[in-house]
Image: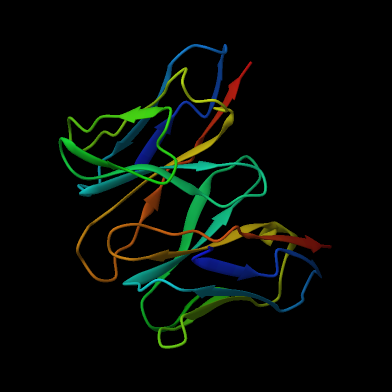
């Protein structure tokens, strides 16, 4: 049983396109992280959300706690956005992780 | 600057040898976690600790051991009992019991056993 489902698993986009990655989860959470993992493995937390919407530059994250769903949007995508994006709900005791969405942005 | 440091980034070991991965944080976080990542799979919890001198097994603890003698440090030992140790290992830390808790993640250690 997967507590976290992400879609799509793989995504290829042309530079400039608007991108959406979706995350559905089944656990009760206190917060949800969106993580970025570049080739070579290092992971960076992009957002931590507990409600509503957050925006950092071209990245926007939204969460609907009642529906147990979160989305990550990238506006005006760029090749440097190519990475794996991972949804990580936090229950207050531990994190759960999606399998990630592998994004490739083509110039 | 506060952060979490894993070392080394790449590690090679011969089969049958124990190896210890380091994880240190200076964020004064209560909780620390170790995860394993295999190709095409999500991160899976190995062990976690929410307080010094206490830790709990995660989903895939067999073949691993940890210690939490100091709040700042949570080393992971991959023992010879771990049947398939080659993987990417990630350490994380966070506050516990607080709403809106943000986590910090290390850069990871890629372990290759030959």
- Is residue A23 placed above or below B14 in the rendered structure? below
Residue A27 sits in which quadrant?
Answer: bottom left
Query: How far across and how far down the image is residue B51, in percent?
Result: 17, 44
Number of numbered discs visible in the structure rendering: 0
- Is residue A28 placed above or below A84 in the rendered structure? below
Specify the color scheme. Answer: rainbow
Query: Do we see residue A37 in this rendering?
Result: yes
Left or right, B44 with reference to B56? right
Query: How far across and how far down the image is residue B50, in percent?
Result: 21, 48
- Is residue B48 placed above or below A63 in the rendered structure? above
Query: How far across and how far down the image is residue A30, in percent?
Result: 31, 72
Left or right, B18 with reference to A28? right
Left or right, A61 with reference to B75? right
Left or right, A77 with reference to B6? right
Q: Residue at x 70, y 64 (%)?
A: A9
Residue A8 sits in which quadrant?
Answer: bottom right
Query: How far across and how far down the image is residue A16, in percent?
Result: 77, 74
Query: Do we see residue B2 in this rendering?
Result: no
- Which is more toward the observer, B83 or B14? B83
- Which is more toward the observer, B8 or B15? B15
Q: Quadrant of the C terminus of chain A?
A: bottom right
Q: Residue at x 59, y 28 (%)?
A: B86
- Which is more toward the observer, B110 or B1? B110
Q: Residue at x 48, y 11 (%)?
A: B17
């Amino acid at each position: 049983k997967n507590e976290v489902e992400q879609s799509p698993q793989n995504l290829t986009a042309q530079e400039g396109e608007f991108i959406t990655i979706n995350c559905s989860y089944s656990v009760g959470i206190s917060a949800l992280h969106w993580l970025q993992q570049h080739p070579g493995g290092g992971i960076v937390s992009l957002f931590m959300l507990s409600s509503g919407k957050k925006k950092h530059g071209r990245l926007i994250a939204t969460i609907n706690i009642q529906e147990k769903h979160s989305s990550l949007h990238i506006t005006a995508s760029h090749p440097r956005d190519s990475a794996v994006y991972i949804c990580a709900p936090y229950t207050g005791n531990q994190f759960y992780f999606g399998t990630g969405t592998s994004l490739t942005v083509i110039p | 600057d506060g952060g979490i440091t894993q070392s080394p980034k790449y590690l090679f070991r011969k089969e049958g040898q124990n190896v210890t991965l380091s994880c240190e944080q200076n964020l004064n976080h209560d909780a620390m976690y170790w995860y394993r990542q295999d190709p095409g799979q999500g991160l899976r919890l190995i062990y976690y600790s929410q307080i010094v001198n206490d830790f709990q097994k995660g989903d895939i603890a067999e073949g691993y051991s940890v210690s939490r003698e100091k709040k700042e440090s949570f080393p992971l030992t991959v023992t010879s009992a771990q049947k398939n140790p080659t993987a990417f290992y990630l350490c994380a830390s966070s506050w516990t019991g607080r709403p809106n808790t943000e986590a910090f993640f290390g850069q990871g250690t890629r372990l290759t056993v030959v």
